Image (cartoon, rainbow, N blue to C red):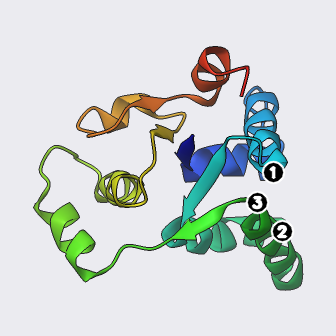
């Protein structure tokens, strides 16, 4: 199974944000186990996290954290046509969410995993929260 993990879920994991840390941790751990679950993150998420994490970590620490993450999750980047397609997609009010969904579709993801499920009502693929995903697919 292939999942695209949204920025907020990864930040929950990296920043140990309660009450979401445990499900984010379990999701990332299952991707790291490489037993039937392949995780993806967008290049935009990596850039956003590098910026967001600056308040807590040094540049070297951020690089190390994100390099470790890239050992677990595959990075996908939209190409020109995918960006144009996302710009034309009016089903999303937030372009960043639309770009995440477009990357998920083009990477062959089965699900988008986010805490902001309601922001993805226009998604062409199913969207679940980390806890919903883990409850439904606990035996992965």
Q: Are marks 3 and 2 in contact (CB under 8 Å)?
A: yes
Q: What is the number of the mark on residue 68?
A: 2
* Residue at (32, 57) in percent of width and height: 102
Question: Along the line of sight, which residue is nearer the eye, 93 or 133?
Answer: 133
Q: Secondary structure at mark 1?
A: helix
Q: Residue at x 87, y 84 (%)?
A: 60
Q: Is residue 140 above or below residue 66?
A: above
How far apart, in angstroms, are the residues tagged by discs 3 and 2? 7 Å
Quadrant the C terminus occupies: top right
Residue at numbered disc 1: 32
* Disc 3: which residue: 72
Residue that appears at 25% across and 82% down: 80
Q: Secondary structure at mark 2?
A: helix
Asked whether the beta carbons under mark 1 and mark 3 sit within 8 Å of each other, the answer is: yes
Dot 1: few (<14), some (14–19), or many (≥20) neighbours within 10 Å? some
Q: Residue at x 10, y 62 (%)?
A: 88
In front of the other: 109 or 27 = 109
Locate residue 28, reporting x and y percent.
76, 45
- The reply, left or right, for residue 14 in relation to residue 128 is right
Element under disc 3 = helix
């Amino acid at each position: 199974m292939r999942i695209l993990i949204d920025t907020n879920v990864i930040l929950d994991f990296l920043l140990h944000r309660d009450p979401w840390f445990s499900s984010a941790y379990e999701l990332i751990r299952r991707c790291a186990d490489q037993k039937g679950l392949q995780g993806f993150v967008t290049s935009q998420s990596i850039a956003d996290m590098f910026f967001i994490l600056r308040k807590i970590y040094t540049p070297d620490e951020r690089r190390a954290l994100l390099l470790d993450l890239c050992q677990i999750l595959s990075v996908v980047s939209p190409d020109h046509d995918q960006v144009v397609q996302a710009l034309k997609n009016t089903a999303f009010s937030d372009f960043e969410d639309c770009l995440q969904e477009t990357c998920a579709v083009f990477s062959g993801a089965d699900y988008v995993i986010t805490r902001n499920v309601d922001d993805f009502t226009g998604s062409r693929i199913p969207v679940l929260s980390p806890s919903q995903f883990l409850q439904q697919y606990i035996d992965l």
